[in-house]
Image: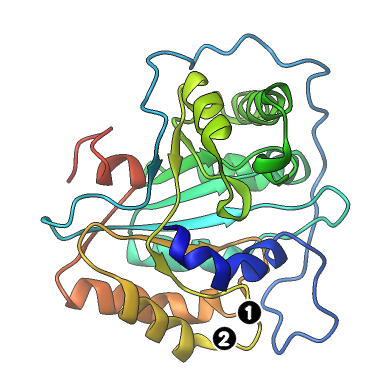
Amino acid sequence: MKKYLPLLLLLLISSCAPVPKTPTLILSLPTLTATVTPTSTPMAVPWVMPTPPAEVITSGDWIEPYVALTFDLCQDPQYPAGYDAAIVDVLQRYDVPATFFMGGDWMRTHPDETRLLASNPKFELGNHSWSHADFTTLTAEEMARELEMTEDMLFQLTGKHSQLFRPPSGEYNDLSLQVTSEHGLYTILWDSVSGDPDPTFDSVTILAEIQRTVRKGSIIIMHANGRGWHTAEALPSVIEYLQNKGFILVTVSQLIGLEPKP
């Protein structure tokens, strides 16, 4: 998976950074709902057992035709992001599953949207850290706090915990893998890239990128925080292409065997 990072690091960082001054198209402006106050100290974490392997997962197996659509919902606390409701509308219209990797600070400013996503039985919610910090620059204690505060916010809003973690910008090291594992979370990256944080990637380009990279077992990365500029526009074509090619859409937990496949 590291082979993708030099090309996509700037795009992934920008997906949670300040909005470009002149994007080609804005599908949803950042709209913040009432915020939720995080707990002052992380609560006891009941999700720490069992301990998964301290390794990176970029896909499921390459044998069966299962594919997972994933969407990041992240923000730098200094630069709040939005929520692209049109993406969720498309997923619901096609009645397909998806996995959302949610930042703790994003959930804090979007409690109603978080509860809405949690209410859909076909949607899975993952941990995407609290502040979208680069985990390769943090101490073990700082990483633990990022994970725990995010889990606490998720539980406070939805009564659920996650079993998946996506490191911000796809950056990780041996220490972050170990800390994530000790918190009972699987580290999830991707192997099929949409390129949707780039405002110049229109719906045709996004579809072409997914067509170029998707295969059996793929995890596809997109963004639903208003900074996947043409994602909602491209998503119907993406879903129809995958289904017409015989791919079966599942959550990440289903893809990697944590939950039963359909």
Local packing at callout 2 (Cα closer than 10 Å; few below 14, some 14-19, many 20+) is: some
Q: Residue furthest right?
A: 78
Location of residue 77 in the rendering, given as x and y in whole percent from the top left corner: 83, 47
Q: Is residue 155 left or right of residue 78?
A: left
**Along the viewing direction, whichever of 70 and 62 lies nearer the viewer:** 62
Residue under pointer 2: 201
Type of amino acid at the residue the image marks with label 2: Phe
**Along the viewing direction, whichever of 28 and 143 lies nearer the viewer:** 143
Local packing at callout 1 (Cα closer than 10 Å; few below 14, some 14-19, many 20+) is: many
Q: What secondary structure is marked by label 1?
A: loop
CB within 8 Å, label 2 to label 1? yes
Location of residue 66 in the rendering, given as x and y in whole percent from the top left corner: 21, 57
Instruction: Determine the residue positioned at 17% across, 46% down.
Output: 262
Q: What secondary structure is marked by label 2?
A: loop
Q: Is residue 208 visible?
A: yes
Instruction: Determine the residue positioned at 67% across, 65% down.
Output: 15
Q: Is residue 217 left or right of residue 229?
A: left
Location of residue 257 in the rendering, given as x and y in whole percent from the top left corner: 23, 37
Residue 211 against residue 117 in the figure, above or below: below
Instruction: Determine the residue positioned at 56% across, 75% down.
Output: 196
Residue 57 against residue 24 in the figure, above or below: above
Residue under pointer 1: 198
Q: Is residue 161 visible?
A: no
